[in-house]
Structure formats: structure tokens, C-alpha cells
């Protein structure tokens, strides 16, 4: 599911992980890719089991060829990941359901949770500006 989410929602591959080989040209890792993102994308990952799974990590070179880089944080270093506090609040307060059965459902639920977080951050910034 994570690989599919990265391919569809982050990389913009319409066919998802199934077309990753074709998008990266599938003929060898050094061949010029058929498809590439307009803007590079870096996905910052901790070492959760889903992030370190062979099905995901094994596609690292193909993802890089289409403009999606995977950057792994050192183990046991949540202090390096600023999003942890924001994600914790989004995960426990805003994420509507704990299980999803499709990439689209995951994307919509995450978008909704992160939009709530964005609105909170903007409101907080507005309040600070007014107070100053």
C-alpha cells in the first residue's frame, strides 16, 4: 500500500506501482527514464517496518529515476523529524478511520487530516501576528 501511495499520490503515476518498471524504462537502471516528475520529490522516512519493507525499499532506484528520492532518518531519532508532532496530532485527532481499503481512501483521509493541521497552523500564525 505504501509503494502504491508513493507511486500514485506522490509520483503521479496513473497506473501506480504496476507501471513503475515501465516509467523507469524497465530496461536497466542506467537507461534514461520514459517518465519523470516535473519537480523532484523527497520522501523523508523513519525506519518503520512499512518504510523498510523490501517491496518498498527495493524500488528505491526506480523511484529515483522518475524523480522520487527516499531519505531515511537514522534509527531512534524522532527529534530530527519535525513533522512528528504535527503528524501525531493529525493521526490521533483528525484521521477519521484507522483502516482504509484503497489508495484513494488513504489519500483522502490523510489529505483531510493534514488540511486540518494546516488550518490550525495558519490560525496560530495569524494569532501570533495579531499579538505582535
Image (cartoon, grey):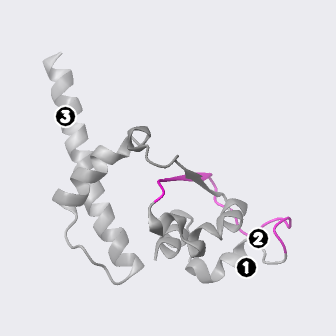
- Residue 123 lies left or right of residue 16; in this view the side is left
Give the residue number, with chain letter if any, for mark 3: 124
Determine the image quadrant of residue 128: top left
The residue that appears at 66% across and 76% down in the rendered structure is 20
Percent coordinates x, y for residue 123 in the rendering: 18, 37
Badge 2: how crowded within 10 Å, few (<14), some, or many (20+)? few
Q: Is residue 40 visible?
A: yes
Percent coordinates x, y for residue 120 in the rendering: 20, 43
Q: Regarding mark 3 in the picture, which secondary structure is present there?
A: helix
The residue that appears at 84% across and 73% down in the rendered structure is 28
Q: Identify the mark nearer the N-term, 3 or 2.
A: 2
The magenta segment is: 28-47
Distance CA(mark 3)–CA(mark 2): 44 Å
Q: Is residue 13 visible?
A: no
The residue that appears at 26% across and 52% down in the rendered structure is 88
The residue that appears at 39% across and 44% down in the rendered structure is 78
Residue at the farthest front position: 76
Q: Regarding mark 2 in the picture, which secondary structure is present there?
A: loop
Q: Which label was assigned to residue 34?
A: 2
CB atoms of marks 2 and 1 within 8 Å: yes
- Give the position of the C terminus as an image quadrant: top left
Give the residue number, with chain letter if any, for mark 1: 22
Distance CA(mark 3)–CA(mark 1): 45 Å
Badge 3: how crowded within 10 Å, few (<14), some, or many (20+)? few
- Residue 19 lies left or right of residue 10; in this view the side is right
Badge 1: how crowded within 10 Å, few (<14), some, or many (20+)? some
Amino acid at each position: 500500500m505504501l509503494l502504491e501511495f508513493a507511486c500514485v499520490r506522490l509520483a503521479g503515476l496513473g497506473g501506480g506501482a504496476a507501471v513503475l518498471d515501465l516509467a523507469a524504462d524497465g530496461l536497466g537502471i542506467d537507461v534514461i527514464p520514459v517518465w519523470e516528475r516535473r519537480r523532484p520529490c523527497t520522501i523523508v522516512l523513519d525506519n518503520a517496518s512499512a518504510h523498510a519493507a523490501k517491496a518498498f525499499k527495493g524500488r528505491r532506484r526506480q523511484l529515483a529515476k522518475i524523480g522520487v528520492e527516499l531519505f531515511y532518518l537514522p534509527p531512534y531519532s524522532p527529534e530530527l523529524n519535525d513533522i512528528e508532532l504535527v503528524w501525531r496530532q493529525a493521526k490521533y485527532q483528525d484521521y477519521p478511520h484507522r483502516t482504509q481499503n484503497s489508495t484513494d481512501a488513504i489519500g483522502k483521509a490523510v489529505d483531510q487530516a493534514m488540511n486540518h493541521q494546516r488550518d490550525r497552523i495558519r490560525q496560530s500564525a495569524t494569532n501570533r501576528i495579531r499579538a505582535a
